[in-house]
Amino acid sequence: QVQLVESGGGLVQPGGSLRLSCAASGIRFSINAMGWYRQAPGQQREVIALITPNGGTNYADSVKGRFSISRDNAKNTVYLQMNSLKPEDTAVYYCAGSTGWSTSPIDFTSWGQGTQVTVSS
């Protein structure tokens, strides 16, 4: 059974930084694309960062240059480093696992429970 557990969310002031972690179990982590999504109140869930098994990355325009996704295959963990945070980054952040190498949205079938990130002064 696939399990993804996020951690690292919290309250941060505008301009601050946070690092989210997602520990995966029950999957062959090293051959799965991983991603971070977020959902703000009243809005649809959106993809913000993707990483392929060999480390290729892709970002939403809204976070490009501020967020960085990385993975440690030895620890079955994916990270999201968030810098220069803005109030509009406030959302529940979800870790997601693909069924394989694909980063197509339809292939992200495993989800964590989400972690709240609030950016406010």
Image (cartoon, rainbow, N blue to C red):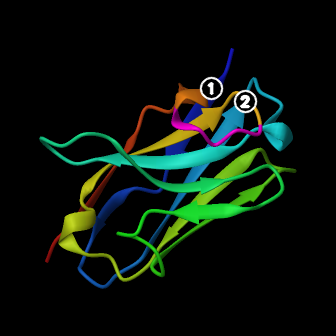
Q: Residues within 10 Å of mark 1 (few under 14, many from 20)?
A: some
**Farthest residue, direction top:** 1
Are the residues flagged by discs 2 and 1 in contact, CB closer than 8 Å?
A: yes
Can residue 98 be seen at all in this image of the molecule? yes
The amino acid sitting under disc 1 is Gln
In which quadrant of the rendered view does residue 79 lie? bottom right
Q: Is residue 94 left or right of residue 55?
A: left
Coordinates of residue 63 in the picture (x, y in percent): 40, 70
State which tag comes first along the sequence, 2 or 1. Answer: 1
Can residue 119 be seen at all in this image of the molecule? no
* Quarter containing the C terminus: bottom left
| Above or below, 101 relative to 55 | above
User: Under tag 1, what secondary structure?
Assistant: strand
The amino acid sitting under disc 2 is Ser
Q: Is residue 28 left or right of residue 95?
A: right
In which quadrant of the rendered view does residue 28 lie? top right
Q: Residue at x 66, y 52 (%)?
A: 78
The front one of 120 and 71 is: 71
Q: Which residue is mark 2?
A: 25
The residue stretch that appears in magenta: 101-105
The front one of 23 and 48 is: 48
Q: Residue at x 19, y 70 (%)?
A: 87
| Above or below, 37 relative to 67 | above
Q: Residue at x 27, y 64 (%)?
A: 89
Q: Which residue is mark 1?
A: 3
